[in-house]
Image (cartoon, rainbow, N blue to C red):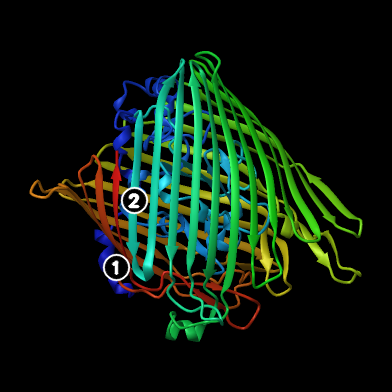
Amino acid sequence: MKKNQLIWLLPFLTLNFQLHASEDNKSIEPSYRASSNKVALKKYNTENKDEVVLSPVTVTGSSTIQDELSSPKSVSIYTREDIKRSGVTNLMDFFKNFTEIQAETNFGNTLNPQISMRGFGNGTGYQNINVIVDGVSLNQIDLVPQQLGSVPVDSIEKIEVVKNDGTVVYGDNAAAGTIIIRTNNSFERKPLYGSVRSSFGTYDTTLTSANFGSVTDFKGFKVLADGKFTFLNTDGKKTVLSDDSKDSTENVNGRATLGLQKDNLEVLTSFIKDDAHVTYNGNMTLDAFNQNPNSAVTTGQRNIVHKEDWSTALKYKINDRFNLSYTYGNKTKDSKFPDFAFTPHYEGEDHRLTLQTLQDDFVILAGFEHSDNARTTSNETTAKENIAGFISGDYFVNDRLSLNAGFRQAFITFRHDDRGINNHLSKTVNPNSYNIAANYSLDNTDALFASYVHAFQSPDIDRFFVTNFFTVPPRKTFNFAINSMEMDTYAIGYKHIEDNLRVKAEFFYSDLNNEIYFDSNQFINTNFDNSEKYGIDLSLFKDIGWFHASINYLYTATRAKLGSAHVEISAQPKHIVLATIGKEFTCQLLPLPYHTVSLTHKYQSESFPQDDFDNTLGRQQNYNATTFNYQVSDHKHWTVDFSILNLFDGHNGQFVDFGASQSVAYPTNYQRTFQGSVSYRF
């Protein structure tokens, strides 16, 4: 798409997806409709806690549940309806084209995309965002990003994107922020419920999903039984291997949940199984990409993943003042790369215990976490164990002013064992994080907020250990060129939130020591001594009546000291614009009378290629993609939608520095594609 086309479109484009209320949560009203903030907080945390967790107006990534206006957090919320209106079949496409998050393939692999925000760039951004699904983290201990491809979009009820916050409550991997994804495990549902969806798209892309469940009474217990199934398949766009295989995806995901509720006790247990076979795109020279990004390559790869997870959540309301909760996750994964002799096996356990007290003027959340995750290959086992305690509290000084503060102490142990050569390595680091934040209500619809966060990021096991090839046989040693990162972030902002007009403005500044990066010249992972990031986050939503319009604009500047020079963080655009124009109308002449039409555009400015740490290869092209969606529904059972992705057929790509004189390109979202779906809910 040409720059003049973008400029012409911007006044008419808006970001609206996260601003529509869920049909199932209309009873949860925002705080500006309540008589006071304290009344709203009591309703959220005591009277309707199970309902507000999935409400599109509430924020849960803190010691207490608040809504956007009363919370000192910088947050964007997306609901099931937002995802459904986008027409996407996977979570990566939703993040990439319908949120302010940067999202790219992992060197072509769509199963484990790289995500980034707040100035870290795609190279390390995903390691600074903790992705939590129903209380269990998706983050891995090595260089493999979160497996977002294993989260079916039709299973998601709500996504919270909390920026520059989460290291106190959620710990390691949250320096840039936290993404909290929730599925619907509420007991407050129909005795029998369900949904089915069938979707078809370009290149024989098919998505079939089904959800069936019931909530019944049995001998004084509420019994929840829920089953979800999703099958995603695409035949691919282009040849990517020498055997003429195309960039195809086959992903089968199933989830079974059983829950019991009696009086003040609730227990939920889920088993999740995911099987994926991905043949993904390879890299191209810049000349080949510029001539035809759809031309065949032989540099693609295959990845076969089998994943099984168990999770258990226990909640106990001790009394009106105290709540106890415990979450357990057991994770196993086998990953195969048939083109390489690399078949890692992952095992891990996560424990999280919290105690919350709700008082008249303050709320305190104290917790303990223990996670132990290991990766085993044919001849070695490497592990990362994290033990931490934290406390976070909100103090409501009066009906206008609220304060939030917290502290976390972590003890992180890295372990490595080589089989047969008696090589055992172990080292422990003990980082901490803390924060303080304030929110001041100017009136019922306006508020100011400010925060300070001290965060940390420990290295992953691939960065923490290196192989010494001068020994026979080669042995792993500690990487003495790398340290844990520390970051201090200051933010101040303003927000105006009412039904038809929403405005947010935020300025942030981050001062970092030991920011982690990959030196593509020497092929080592190391640290910048000092670096900084600062930016402006603006959003505007307006419902004019006959259409709604809004726009998000993010400006992010980065600066890192490299010897005597200063460089920018690679794969980090300075400007991101996300916008949509939408129109809702009714036509009673049709069997599905409710219609929604929307046009969304995302623009990311030029940036240095990923891993171009010294900025020697020059800036690569910007990203432009426009999506059209048309949806009809009866607001009860049936929904039909049709989407066009990359409407103007822009040639987009991910550009990477592999230490050569030119970067290489991985084509992403480089063609116009079509998709439609039919869904039924009961």
Amino acid type indicated by mark 2: Arg
Picture quarter containing residue 335?
A: bottom right
Number of numbered tags placed on the structure image: 2
Amino acid type indicated by mark 1: Ile
**Residue 49 vs residue 419: left or right?**
left
Q: Nearer the viewer, residue 663 or 387?
A: 387
| Rendering coords of residue 610 (x, y %) | 57, 69
Q: Is residue 438 above or below residue 506?
A: above
Q: Which residue is mark 2?
A: 197
Q: Is residue 322 above or below residue 302?
A: above
Query: Which of the labelled discs sits on residue 82, or is there none?
Result: none
Counting residues from the start of the chain, the first of labels 2 and 1 encountered is 1
Q: Nearer the viewer, residue 427 or 273?
A: 273
Q: Nearer the viewer, residue 560 or 673?
A: 673
Mark 2–mark 1 Cα distance, whole angstroms, equals 37 Å
**Residue 183 vs residue 481: left or right?**
left
- Dot 1 falls on a residue whose secondary structure is helix
Dot 1, crowdedness within 10 Å: few (<14), some or many (≥20)? few
| Rendering coords of residue 313 (x, y %) | 56, 31
Quadrant where the image shows the C terminus: top left
Task: Give the residue drawn at x 51%, y 81%.
Answer: 244
Q: Is residue 596 above or below residue 287?
A: above
Whether residue 525 is visible here, answered yes or no, is yes
Picture quarter containing residue 618?
A: bottom right
- Dot 2 falls on a residue whose secondary structure is strand
Q: Is residue 503 above or below residue 232?
A: above
Task: Give the residue drawn at x 50%, y 56%.
Answer: 149
Query: Which of the labelled discs sits on residue 7, or is there none?
Result: 1
| Rendering coords of residue 566 (x, y %) | 63, 67
